[in-house]
Image (cartoon, rainbow, N blue to C red):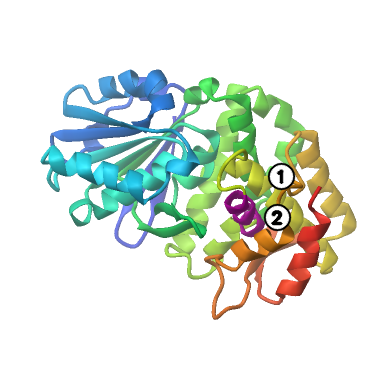
Amino acid sequence: MRKINLQLNNIKIPILVGSNILKTINPENYVKRNDVVIITNSTIAKLYLKQTKRMFKDYNVDSLILRDGEKYKNIKTLQQIHDYLIKNKYDRSLTIVALGGGVIGDMVAFAADTFMRGVQLIHIPTTLLAQVDSSIGGKCGINHPLGKNMIGSFKHPSVILMDSAILKTLPKREFMAGMAEVIKYGLIKNKSFFKFIDNNYSKIIQQNTDCLLRTIFTCASIKAQVVKEDELESGIRAILNFGHTFGHAIEASKNYKGILHGEAISVGMNIASAISADQGYLTHDEYCNIEDMLLNMQMPTMIPKKITSASIMKHIGHDKKKISGRNRFILLDKIGNAFINDKLDNKYLKEISKNFIR
């Protein structure tokens, strides 16, 4: 097992990475008092709820099982969590465990932050995407019909437990969606890691233990470093949203149905890389290298043809990165370095989106 310490101003958050660590970890240092509620979804509950309950066997542990899917990441489900906690008379000494992927992690963390103005939280991410990205950094929230993650806050856990063995039951499509975020880290911050992915993606996808653990640890380390530099996303942390402007617009245009978050981000990264080349920041060869990697992994690179450019632009208009009405895009000036660009107007973006609808 390897450990990353995410050191912020007032707290230190341990991130533990290993294989089968849920069978050996002692949660004593991370639970506030006696009451523990594990919140998960119907899919994960069948696979890992019993095992997770055993981990907290010395505590008064209960569970809440939610419906599975991005479309349930909304205020109605948030209220369901609050209703459960209030009706069962839990107090501020409660520890909530978020057992699931990005949807569960975001929503449960937001519930933990807002129930009685904040109770203790533990993250156990069960998807590759959640392990390498969404469980780290404290951002949490729910979707609004007009945009993804429009309602939220920051809530840091007492610990993040990343068990690579859990990923063996992850459907291949879900695993590949997580690979989009893995590639993102190489593109925005670490060219040598991008090369490692390029040379070893078959082993990573086959879940070779050493390659997979190295991948998870490297991604988590990169994100922890960026979050340490910019905890509240007022500056450099925005680079973590590479590919997310178009990605979120695609998800919203599809009403969060039929496309996974990572699949939408794959398309968004391809478009952002193409814009970077079109604007003269990336070379043509660098862009082709990026697109080839996505295609070699059979990841989507084009906007689904039933989505219109008007729909894309509507949802880009609600992008959280905008400041004073100006679009803020994350672009690349080389593989391994991202920057914020606020000079792309809507006319240009609409034309670009038209070019990528197939």
Q: Which residues are magenta?
A: 243-253
- Decide whether the magenta segment is chiefly helix, strand or loop: helix
Name the residue located 31 percent from the left edge and 34 percent from the top edge. Answer: 39
Name the residue located 74 percent from the left edge and 41 percent from the top edge. Answer: 300
In the rendered view, tell whether residue 355 sits above or below residue 216.
Answer: below
Left or right: 35 in relation to 127: left
SS type, badge 1: helix
Percent x, y of residue 42: 39, 27
Percent x, y of residue 75: 35, 51
In the rendered view, tell whether residue 335 sits above or below residue 93.
Answer: below
Which amino acid, by three-letter code, is at mark 1? Phe
Q: Nearer the viewer, residue 279 or 224?
A: 279
Q: Which residue is mark 1?
A: 194
Percent x, y of residue 101: 46, 36
Name the residue located 58 percent from the left edge and 32 percent from the top edge. Answer: 174
**Residue 277 occupies quadrant:** bottom right
Marks 1 and 2: in contact by CB < 8 Å? Answer: yes
The reply to whether the magenta stretch includes residue 245 is yes
Mark linked to residue 336: 2
Percent x, y of residue 262: 61, 42
Mark linked to residue 75: none
N-terminal label among 2 and 1: 1
**Residue 91 occupies quadrant:** top left
Left or right: 159 in relation to 262: left
Residue at the right extreme, as displayed = 284
Q: Nearer the viewer, residue 173 or 333?
A: 173
